[in-house]
Image (tube, helix red, strand yellow):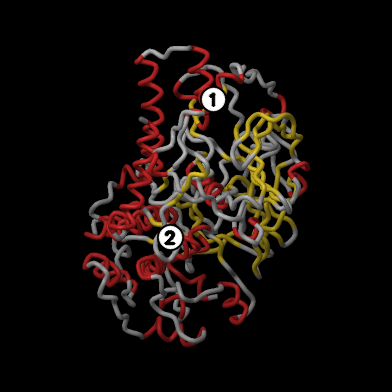
Amino acid sequence: EADGECNGTHEIELCEIMPEGHEKADPSQFELLKVLGQGSFGKVFLVRKISGQDTGTLYAMKVLKKATLKVRDRVRTKMERDILADVNHPFVVKLHYAFQTEGKLYLILDFLRGGDLFTRLSKEIMFTEEDVKFYLAELALALDHLHSVGVIYRDLKPENILLDADGHISLTDFGLCKEALDDQKAYSFCGTVEYMAPEVVNRRGHNTAADWWSFGVLLFEMLTGALPFQGANRKETMTLILKAKLGMPAYLSPEAQSLLRALFKRNPANRLGAGPEGVEELKRHPFFSSIDWSKLYSKEIEPPFKPAVSKADDTFYFDQEFTTRTPKDSPGVPPSANAHQMFKGFSFVAPFLLDDQVDGVEIMQSHPAEKTTLSKRLSGVKPNSIHDEYDLSEEVGRGSYSVCRRCVHRVTRQEYAVKIIPKKTRDCQEEIEILYRYGHHSNIISLRDVYEDDAHVYLVMELMKGGELLDKILRQKFFSEREASAVLLTLTNAVQYLHQNGVVHRDLKPSNIMYADISGSPESLRICDFGFAKQLRAENGLLMTPCYTANFVAPEVLKKQGYDAACDIWSLG
């Protein structure tokens, strides 16, 4: 095959890989949970390890019918196992195990709940060049690292780029030479040709420079929403890649246009990134002038967008540590019901926020429930019964539209709270998305699971064992200024985080501010109940990165958003 001829690469069979101190792995140690992806090469499964030190850990298992790894010849020859073990990089998916059986190769990789989000980003979010710069800079570091250990992609495409829960990229599928028996198969194997460099398309043999062409295609696609070379069919697309002159959209900055021209060089030797300095050339390009590369590498730069994925960590349900731990905290004792009644007459809601007043009773309008099921509209909503995984017990709170009950996970015996919302009263899609996206903040309640049946939606969240801020105020009768300022500083920081991300809470009051544990420390404060919260969106309904909002949102939209944000500030007061 032409691929074998490129730059002294040769193909090797894969040796077994396992983490240090772990025993050799084989297929019997992994329980298949579900199929995550499928292609002509094989399948990707979500699996759970059922023996060994990492029992209970969730992984993605890629099973390839026939695969070899390409490795550039090096003076210091590396053992095959070292090569993949060396692919240890903040922006590359970690490979934990590799083993093979007759004709099948097994790769056990990190399972990222964010999944193949990169492909969806361009469809769901409005990006600016600044935002695109962040992702492409992380990608450049990952690619350069793979090149340094002899891995060439050949068909880098959005499906290879996953996002972790914080929004950083994670490159996957590295080093798999998609080998096939004949040309026809080889093409179906590689899937899309749109991202391939001319030298890959005409099968003249290629080196790492091919990946910098693909990098250019991704850059163009993220900046414009379209592919640079796309014909009516595969053959036409290949012809365009080999011959067409690229029209550059006028709205792209001169720096972006210059970078694209430097990447789309049909002679690989002239392509940016292909010279003796490699990625350093690319890093020095004016397009990336605002990037601090060392901060980027150490993940100190905040990603433009946080994916809406569950906070539950991979091993959460099945980790031995959780299943054996005894809960130590007990719920805080609420003060008399009388005290709550006294506070009922006192409103923490800004007067200009109230949509309506009925006989002096404050009503906030809510969204009517949508007809389609939530699980069809949102990933991460489970259509199966909550009772399969949790035992529900006593009521711990009640709101205008919902009831909160304590619940216990059947396997781990961990305690949680479940908010039960009748579907006919309101659509809670916005609330779920906001909690998935921003519940990672230390002072915002975190959402563990979402279930739905015909009548209700169930939000499983951390149990607030320290009770409401209101209860603490009533128990203590008096807060010193020092205590009050510590509480307010914590809450203000959390509200600032929400506002920066275009979210307004619109219902901040002491009963929606709770303590996660009985310590009563400001760190354990959580803002709860996002039932009235709103996320700022563009006119087309897409979410926007903070950078996009600042540059392109109409003043009247920002004014309305500022109005709502002012309500939160009023409530803090």
Q: Which circle marks residue 125 in the picture?
A: 2
Q: Which circle marks residue 424 in the picture?
A: none
Q: Are marks 1 and 2 in contact (CB under 8 Å)?
A: no
The image shows residue 484 at horizontal and vertical percentages of 38, 19
| Gap in angstroms between the C-alphas marked 1 and 2 | 36 Å
Give the quarter of the figure containing the N terminus: bottom right
The quarter of the displayed image where residue 395 is located: top right
Q: Is residue 516 left or right of residue 52?
A: left
The quarter of the displayed image where residue 260 is located: bottom left
Q: Check disc 1: other Cα within 10 Å, few if <14, some if 14-19, many if 20+.
A: many
Could you tell me if residue 277 is visible in this image? Answer: no
Residue in view at x 51 percent, y 61 percent: 160
Residue in view at x 31 percent, y 59 percent: 553
The image shows residue 247 at horizontal and vertical percentages of 30, 80
- Please report whichever mark, 1 or 2, sits nearer to the chain's N-terminal start: 2
Q: Is residue 547 above or below residue 253?
A: above
